[in-house]
């Protein structure tokens, strides 16, 4: 349940949520991801580079019918980090709504 | 259920969650808020100014036993915006975990 500032950034949170929604070991092509999330090429590239550096996504370049393609998939570490971050957000939401909850649990 | 980039910033999200946890119309002194959230004076000031400009918090300066004091409270608009943002985060978490959920609902 760790709050992860890298994942928290709105665009990266949406990228991670999209990727985990694909299911285990699934990958998506850069252009598809760009269209789905309505991002510019530069913006998506920049955020993917940050996520790759953290080990949260794997990026593979290759060819499909002689056209260059870039494939992106979530790593196991990325999936775990996203799950932890979502749990941290839910805890924060719970505390915000029921401020006495944490104290009451101690009784 | 509106994703609010202003509130989403980690420090501001924690400030807003703390303030809403105080209950309706409650206020907190600047120094207390600074200690509770473990922020520097400059950092807290900067984020509170952003939240005040958006109309999400109200900041009042005054004196207590001749010492200058700054009081902060959440506005109704701030409470509504936080609630909307938390709902957006929960929706995002739900979609990330159960990617087919949104589609299945349509059937």
Image: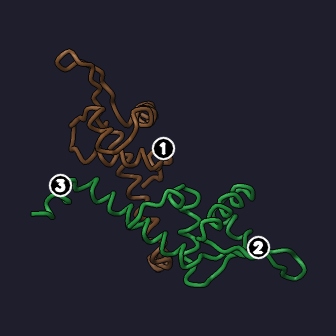
Chain colours: A green, B brown
> Residue A6: which quarter of the image?
bottom right
**Marks 3 and 2, the one that precedes in the sequence:** 2
Asked whether the residues under the numbered discs 3 and 1 touch, taking CB atoms below 8 Å apart as contact, a structural biologist would say no
Quadrant the N terminus of chain A occupies: bottom left
Q: Position of residue B31 (x, y in %)?
A: 29, 33
> Residue B51: which quarter of the image?
top left
Query: Mark 1, chain letter?
Result: B
Res. A70 mark = 2
Q: Secondary structure at mark 3?
A: loop
User: What residue is pinned by disc 3?
Assistant: A100
Q: Is residue A57 left or right of residue A62?
A: left
Q: Secondary structure at mark 1?
A: helix
Residue B41, above or below B63: below
The answer for how far apart the CA atoms under marks 3 and 1 are is: 26 Å
The answer for how far apart the CA atoms under marks 3 and 2 are is: 48 Å
Q: Position of residue A18 (x, y in %)?
A: 57, 70
């Amino acid at each position: 349940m760790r709050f992860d500032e890298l994942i928290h950034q709105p665009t990266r949170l949406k990228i991670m949520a999209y990727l985990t929604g694909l299911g285990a070991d699934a990958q998506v092509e850069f252009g598809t991801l760009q269209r789905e999330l309505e991002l510019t090429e530069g913006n998506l590239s920049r955020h993917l580079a940050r996520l790759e550096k953290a080990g949260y996504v794997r990026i593979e370049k290759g060819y499909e019918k002689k056209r260059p393609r870039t494939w992106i998939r979530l790593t196991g570490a990325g999936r775990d980090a996203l799950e932890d971050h979502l749990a941290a957000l839910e805890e924060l939401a719970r505390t915000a709504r029921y401020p006495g909850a944490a104290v009451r649990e101690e009784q």
